[in-house]
Amino acid sequence: MTFNELNSVENYIIHQLSGVNLNSKGAAEPIEKYGVKWTFKSSDQLNRSVNEVLDEQSLKAALMRLNPSIAADESLADEVIYKLRAILISVNQVGLVRANEEFFKWMTGQKSMPFGENNRHEVIRLIDFKELSNNEYVVTSQYRIHHRETKIPDIVMMINGMPVVIGEAKTPIRPSVSWLDGANEIHRVYENAVPQLFVPNILSFATEGKELYYGTVRTPLLFWAPWRLENDENELAKQLGLSGLGAELTDLLNPKRLLDILLNYSLFSTNNKNQSIKIIPRFQQYEGANMIVERVIEGRIKKGLIWHFQGSGKSLLMVYAAQKLRRSPELKSPTVIILVDRIDLDTQISGTFNAADIPNVETTDSISELQAMLERDTRKIIITTIHKFRDAKPNMNTRENIIVLVDEAHRTQEGDLGRQMRSALPNAFLFGLTGTPVNKADKNTFWAFGAEEDDGGYMSRYTFHDSVRDEATLPLHFEPRLVDVHVDKETIDKAFAELKENLDLTDEEADELTKKSAKMSAFLKSPERIEKIVEDIATHYKEKVEPHGFKAMIVTPDRYACVQYKEELDKFFPEEASKIVMSTTANDPIEFKQKWGVDKSQQTKIVEEFNDEHSDLKFIIVTSKLLTGFDAPILQTMYLDKSMKDHTLLQAICRTNRIYKNKSFGRVVDYFGVFDDTAKALQFDEESVKRVITDLTEVKKMLPEAMAKALFHFEGVDRKITGFEGLEAAQNAINTPELKDAFAQDYKHLSKIWESLSPDRVLDQYLEDYKWLSQVFESVRPASNDIGKLLWFSLGAQTTKLIHENIHVGEVHNLNEFVLDADIIEDIFNNPDPQKTKSLIRTLISRFRGRGSLPKFKSLSERLEELRDKAEKGLISSIEFVKELCKIAKETVQAEKELQEEVKEKSPKAALTDLFLELKTDQTPAVVERIVTDIDSIVRVVRFAGWQDSSQGEREVQKSLRKALYKYKLHKDQMLFDRAYAYIKEYY
């Protein structure tokens, strides 16, 4: 028997979950019917038709088992099922997430029906969350479901007749096929073709027998996550294949785990586009939140420290923990206090709580309000800051079921305010969460949160390398920049020392002089230095950031430097391409405050605009704002010109490592010299953190070997041969699926290095080889987007650009296309060949087909038919036939050229070109064609049908025209603008 996805993965999953071996013809292992294990039933054993999502017979039995009033009157079960069916039907109107949320309320016991005495409402239980053995757990395979079309998911898992888990298994044999192919089938195919199947869904999973990933309804594939086992640091299980997968599978899909995720870890929220989304936890969030809840319920240890690296989801972890603590009956309605480090409460955490619409959440606006809430024993989730505990009285509330969750537990919580908070709540549980490691030099953090019982002082730890491995965050690269714009701290310190000696200054006078220089600000903010840096930023951004669709942040030494950078940046980009986010002080000049001050609402709008991939805003310029708690996945590059170290530095640079489409790393471009000594800049107790930043000099060292490995697949192939002969030779060298996949693996590694380094001059010597490899890769890449997405990935922007710029080398992409030009016709005339003649006839017929109504082409078409008719009747010699055929072909080429010129004359671009040539002066740039092309491409993007009759349409087009003219410094020529706009209005 050969291995395939059915016998080696799908059947393995069923065996792991239920004990039934479908590869064996022997008797199945007996499973207790209502135990907390899964029972296997084949699809034809289920009491449902192909059009039904629910196994209504099983659901009805569960309703009667769990609800006494329904047990007494069986017909009441039909009323409940009728309402559930209505939710399934509504999915096409309200959307899958909304329908899933409504069904979730029924599944978690939030709905009632008037089934009690005197029509009193009673909570309806579809699932027993306390006594798990009261539920029926069924796993089945090849579950046919029909909506507009029939689909057959591999694995469906049902609780009390409701399909709560959908799984897709892929073959473990083909290297290019991965879990992502299965996830893609669930997310892009099944969720759209049969959305009703996913209305009761808790989660879905996909695997190819090596890795297991899971997601929930409408989760983009980018955010599907692996499930790890607690304390799973041993990668050996992964290397052994199915056994490692089986452990993760049974852990995630254990009925107890699934029902816990359903009840306590399913959030419904909205994203920044105001779309409904569903969120379930990554394993580190689930593990961390459960550790907090278990420690509080046990009550023995009163504190704990959680280090989960920046960007791995601490805000959601706190939401999950708070929600589960509040729901735990053992804790008797506890108070959960969320302490944030910022003075204002407009944080990522409060935003997460509000977006997820968690019940009983309060934010406190004042010290007195917080103290009043605690003194009157408020039992809610309270979001506040440590500063609100200023002047708090001791023993303000001595209850034991108060739990304090402290965000970024490494600063103010360790000082006097932290002690006052502990004094006010002497019996509270204290849990600190940090995204940065704890400094060895400061043992107070361990005193404040670390329990002696925890290994290393951490209750839960999720490192940078864990988060990159699980693709929760991206790797970080840094680039030290040009020596002539780099801060030479040693030289400056030496100069100060010489100055002190030469002027015979006292230490106090020297300190005063240092203060006056504002910590090197005289050097840092010198106009010449900033000019050079901004010029470098502009080049770097246009070449390495903008082509990929990403955005950037510039971090400056102080608020006045922000303005300098902005004014200089405006020389390279339109004004709307950059905005400053900073606060002003009471001592600032009124003009400065009015022009540059940004309040909270303005900051929110700027952040929203920055996160919009279609907006004109490319840069945010800051000095201290938005360096923590700022989540903008589109931000990929930080231009750093400010002294920072330790957790402040790590928090700042990790703004760039959030996951985003086509983004493979975050980048820090260092103008200050922060990373001259990375280990010194990141002085933490964790050795691994020193490797958070990948120096691009290390990446450069990897390039030669990566290139050699990719080329090795084509040993003996002459890369100088072009055309289809060269391509055919290359393709023959990798002519099996295994060889193709191995090449793809090595090429993928090489292309990541290339995209990271481009446009570094180190690439020049490898350019021809990389161009050749890229074109070969493109020629053998599977046509379907659904095949092997992890291996046969989308090409990077720099690589795509390279292929496009050199596409004439790659004419091999058109192997089956017959080009009709003078050389081809001449070749056929001089060397008659039956095959070439037939190709020419087919080409001419296809050219005439679309233009038959035009007199010239109609005449040529008729002549061709007459010629073919003569040849068939033997009225013309073969030489005369070829001669006449070539004559028709030449006339066709000429007619096409004339038609092209005619169309061009009437085209909008031609009209604009005429205008610019007419108005051209000595000051007008010579590149008229480029100006016209820019205007044409921008206007075509923003226009829409009937825009001329809409004030909004006119505004958008005028704005786009102004933007295009600005690039060539023509925006102040009002006559040119008015004439150009009149032409656009007429021709577009």
Image (cartoon, rainbow, N blue to C red):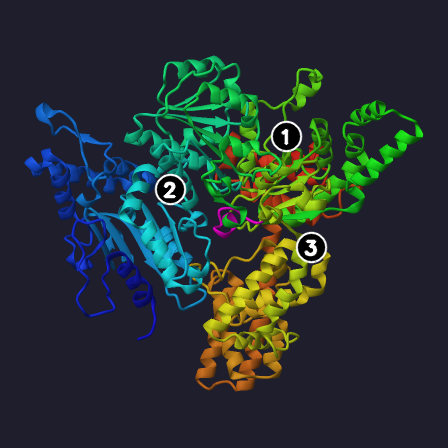
Which residues lie in the magenta part?
Answer: 467-475
Tags 3 and 1 in contact by the CB under 8 Å rule?
A: no
Question: Closer to the N terminus: mark 2 or mark 1?
Answer: 2
Location of mark 3 (residue): 697
Relative to 6, does residue 608 appear above or below in the rendering?
A: above
Relative to 595, does residue 765 appear above or below in the rendering?
A: below
Q: Residue 473 lies in magenta, yes or no?
A: yes
Dot 3 amino acid type: Thr
Position in image of residue 923 (x %, y %): 79, 40
Label 1 crowd bin: few (<14), some (14–19), many (20+), radius 10 Å: some
- Give me the residue at 33% from left, 37% from top: 264
Dot 1 amino acid type: Ser
- Taking the image as drawn, is residue 349 in sight? yes
- Give me the residue at 34% from left, 29% from top: 326
Q: Does residue 430 appear left or right of residue 650 in this picture?
A: left
Question: Closer to the N terminus: mark 2 or mark 3?
Answer: 2
Location of mark 2 (residue): 280
Q: Which residue lies furthest to the left in this view?
A: 72
- Majority secondary structure in the magenta region: loop
Location of mark 1 (residue): 624
Tags 2 and 3 in contact by the CB under 8 Å rule?
A: no
Position in image of residue 557 (x %, y %): 71, 32
